[in-house]
Amino acid sequence: MSKSQILGERVRILTDQLLAIPTTVYQQRSLRAALHLFLDTATKTALHRAVTVSKSALSRFLNEYDWDTAACWRLLNRAQWDALLLAARRQRRARLRLSIDLTSLEKMGQQLPFVRVYNEVYGIHLVVLFAEYRAFKFPIAYRVYRGKGTATPVSLALELLEEVPDDIRRRFQVCVLADSGFEAAVFLDRVRALSFEFVVGVRATRRTLHPGAVTVADCEHGAWLELHNWPHDTLTLARIERGDRTFFSVASEDLLRSS
């Protein structure tokens, strides 16, 4: 078999496994139509463009029918991790980047689930985990932020990182990337406990352990420092100039040793 034939066979097997999840022929036909619709990059995704089933039938399947969507998600998620393992086969020092991002999807409806105002955006707010290895880059897991009084974005991000499979942790040197929304000490603590490297954005006002009220904004690019409320490791500071603004991030010491 050629490489393309092998990939095609893997896709066929995955598709057959997905289509076996719904319990009725009618639901299987709707799922097949949905897959064709969402995976066709040449056609704008709209339910009325579906083939073999009507717009209303596909809408009922996606929004009303009770079928095991969790099993579907688990199957697809495992297939993504397996694709990364396959891509890293025979590589000695495979480094996987896992990026955490809080993404807001602006919405207009008043009756939609999970919709709320956050950071002045009315919509659905997702904490998304992206995986990147060489040419592979895709979202691999997410959590919905439900607002005040529920799990914070930092807590949701840690849930995602803790669910990284053991075989991925053994095979890859994992580096976590996150912006300053995830600079909390509890986040850095847990990432460190998972033995992941990290590059995390920090606010300009974030204090260091230097004598006096020294913030990261007072330090030079490439400086070694320890954060005021996180004295576990020496970190390295990066300053990024973008127009008239300066952004800051800190990187774990292990990351620098391996660079």
Image: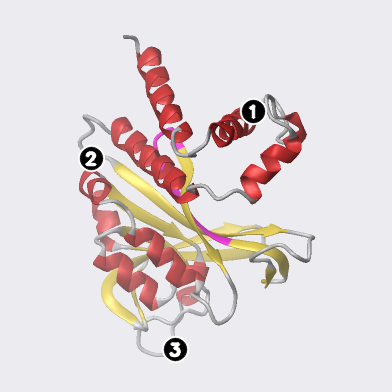
Q: Which residues are magenta?
A: 126-136
Disc number for residue 213: 3
Instruction: Give percent across and percent down for residue 188.
Output: 35, 70
How far, Cα to Cα, is label 3 from label 1? 54 Å
Question: Reading the chain from its start, which is encountered first: label 2 or label 3?
Answer: 2
In which quadrant of the rendered image does the N terminus lie?
top left
Badge 2 local density, few (<14 within 10 Å), some, or many (20+)? few
* Residue position marked by numbered label 2 in the rendering: 93
Is the Cβ of the residue at disc 3 closer than 8 Å to that at disc 1? no
Dominant secondary-structure state across the stretch colored magenta: strand
| Amino acid at the residue labelled 1 | Thr
Asked whether residue 237 is in view, the answer is: no
Quadrant of the rendered image containing residue 191: bottom left
In the image, residue 129 lies in the stretch drawn in magenta: yes
Question: Reading the chain from its start, which is encountered first: label 1 or label 2?
Answer: 1
Along the viewing direction, whichever of 22 and 207 lies nearer the viewer: 22
| Amino acid at the residue labelled 2 | Arg
In this rendering, would 138 be left or right of 96? right
Of tags 1 and 2, which is closer to the observer? 1
Report the residue at 28% width, 67% height from top. 192
| Amino acid at the residue labelled 3 | Ala
Disc number for residue 41: 1
Badge 3 local density, few (<14 within 10 Å), some, or many (20+)? few
